[in-house]
Amino acid sequence: MAPRIWLIAGPTASGKSALALRLADHLGGEIVNADSMQLYRDLSVLSARPTDAEMARAPHHLFGTVDAADGWSVGRWLRAAVEVLADIAERNRSAIVVGGAGLYFRALTEGLAEIPQVPAAVRREAAADFDLMGESAFRGRLAVHDPAAAIRIAPGDRQRLVRAWEVQAATGTPLSDWQNTGAAVLAPDAWRAVALEPPRAELYARCDARLAGMIDAGALEEVAALVARDLDPDLPALKAVGVREFSAHLRGETTLAEALALARQETRRYAKRQSTWMRGQMGGWPRLDALDLDGQWGQFLALGSP
């Protein structure tokens, strides 16, 4: 079989990294990160990045390669991923692109539009509006013009909310519409894909258990080191689930139990948003509903041997 690009998408804690590694073992393939937080070297624990032992089993690309001070956009990831995929193809090996960032996959399979530059005055006005109106009112105004963005953007993500509004204000076209008008990077016959969609209750239980394990693995120390850098709070890495909750605990504002409960709640919300987005945007992708690796692998093979 000729080398192929495999896409594996799924919500947080759904087991997609383990499935990608088994597929890489099976094919002798290489793994490419499509998770917006696993990009950052500062977030090894909180992003559940593959361990050194796991990454030693197969070549991994775009994992922990970006400093938290350097906020990457979808477009920047796409340019880097295209170069990596080209290098893998030159080696005549299969590529497995894995992650939970739905926009990354859409950029690969449908393209990414070149959005006109937003004038500085519009950017300043959008930021001032957010500060004056507050997030709830600002999001409500955005929802009238770009409901998809208002639903997709996570609570507390000031940067992306302001960006969505400034694009709408400057161009008269919603950011979500711009994002749907690019040209596909991958040829339709060059890739196959699956989306993981395990039962929600089981997924949430795994999210809760994994967060507790992150505490033992050094999540608090990781957050302390990141916060100590005094970076712009609007940077993507500072928006990772757990950073806000655990940093509040480190400041003495909450107990560890309270911080963990809040982080678990936000993780479940994040998983729900990812699943909702994938149902809407990846409706044609085959689904795997098992949560354990053996079950997922069996369902994957049943789709047609790779």
Image (cartoon, rainbow, N blue to C red):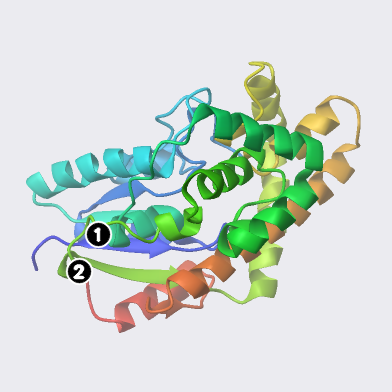
Q: What residue type is labelled 1?
A: Ala
Q: Is mark 1 on a helix, strand or loop?
A: loop
Residue 222 or residue 83, whichever sits in front: 83
Residue 155 rendering spot, x and y as whole percentages: 71, 50
Residue 197 rendering spot, x and y as whole percentages: 52, 73
Q: Name the residue under label 1.
A: 184
Question: In the displayed structure, does residue 241 sit left or right of residue 54?
Answer: right
Identified at 8% across, 45% down, the residue is 90
Q: Is mark 2 on a helix, strand or loop?
A: helix
Residue 198 rendering spot, x and y as whole percentages: 56, 74
Quarter of the rendering containing residue 82: top left
Identified at 51% across, 76% down, the residue is 290
Q: Mark 2 points at which residue?
A: 188
Residues tagged 2 and 1 counted as in contact (Cβ below 8 A): yes
Quarter of the rendering containing residue 97: bottom left
Residue 302 or residue 106, whichever sits in front: 106
Q: In which quarter of the image is the C terminus?
A: bottom left
Q: What residue type is labelled 2?
A: Pro
In the image, farthest residue toward the bottom: 302
Within 10 Å of the Cα at label 1, are there few (<14), some (14-19), or many (20+) other Cα atoms?
some
* Cα gap from disc 2 to disc 1, whole angstroms: 8 Å
Residue 76 visible, this angle: yes
Question: In the displayed structure, does residue 161 sit left or right of residue 20?
Answer: right
Identified at 83% across, 50% down, the residue is 261
